[in-house]
Amino acid sequence: MQESIFYTAKHFTAAEAQGMGFVNRVLPEAGFDAWVAAELAAIAANAPLTLAALKTTVAELLRGHQGDLDRAEAAVARCFASADYVEGRTAFMEKRQPAFKGR
């Protein structure tokens, strides 16, 4: 990323922000609320422990410190050892929606 954006306080359009990697998607105002609701529903449908581990992992990877990476690895290991992991895997095999409990 160009540091000059910060130093010059340059203004740019949503499309330019997307091109620079600041945002994933540019939406028309009319479809924004529906898109947000769908994204939130998709996120909320996932296992809480997995979401927490993913959040930790991404944050630690972005920081790039070995101790942080070790914590991220431990968070992922806790997910694989959880009841939610077993429920998710079982639900997938049974072709049904999982009932996550956050454990």
Image (cartoon, grey):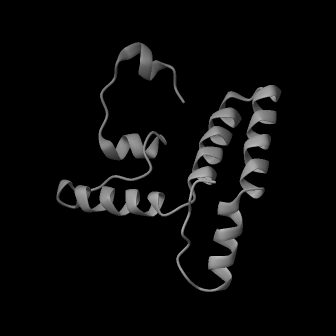
Residue 45 screen position, x and y as percent: 48, 64
Residue at horizontal 39%, vertical 53%? 25
Q: Nearer the viewer, residue 16 or 37?
A: 37
Q: Residue furthest top?
A: 7
Residue 1 occupies quadrant: top right
Left/right placement of residue 48 relative to residue 29 reads right
Residue at horizontal 74%, vertical 39%? 72
Residue 92 occupies quadrant: bottom right
Asked if 73 appears above or below 79 in the picture, the reply is: above
Residue 55 screen position, x and y as percent: 59, 42
Asked if 14 appears above or below 36 in the picture, the reply is: above
Left/right placement of residue 73 relative to residue 102 reads right
Left/right placement of residue 48 relative to residue 18 reads right
Residue 2 screen position, x and y as percent: 52, 26
Residue at horizontal 64%, vertical 54%? 103
Residue at horizontal 55%, vertical 82%? 96
